Image (spheres, rainbow, N blue to C red):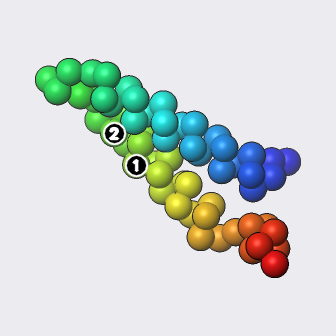
Amino acid sequence: MLTQMDRLTIYSVLCFITFCSLMLRSPNDTSFIALGGLIAAALGLWLELTNSPELEEEEN
């Protein structure tokens, strides 16, 4: 089972990879799949950060 920090790392790397794939392509060759991947990874990252009982315990 993955810990929350593992999931945050995976979402961050996926966000970075899809962002780079969008930036390295020409504007005429933009893929909606890469854009969808960026949105999905950012949404997953946001959900993991808002529902973080493990991170709240570390702050105390």
Residue at the location (62% across, 61% down)?
Answer: 48
Q: Secondary structure at mark 1?
A: helix
Dots 1, 2 in contact, CB < 8 A: yes
**Residue 46: % across, % down:** 53, 61
Looking at the image, residue 45 sits to the left or right of residue 58; the answer is: left
Q: Secondary structure at mark 2?
A: helix
Q: Amino acid at mark 1?
A: Ile
Q: Report x, y in % for residue 16.
A: 48, 36
Residue furthest front as drawn:
60
Residue located 29% across and 35% down the image: 32
| Residue at mark 2 | 35
**Rendered image: mark on residue 39:** 1
Is 25 situated above or below 52? above
Across and down, in percent, residue 58 comes to 81, 69
Label 1, label 2: how far apart the Cα atoms are: 6 Å
Count neighbours of disc 2 (C-alpha within 10 A) and say few if under 14, some if 14 to 19, many if 20 or more: some
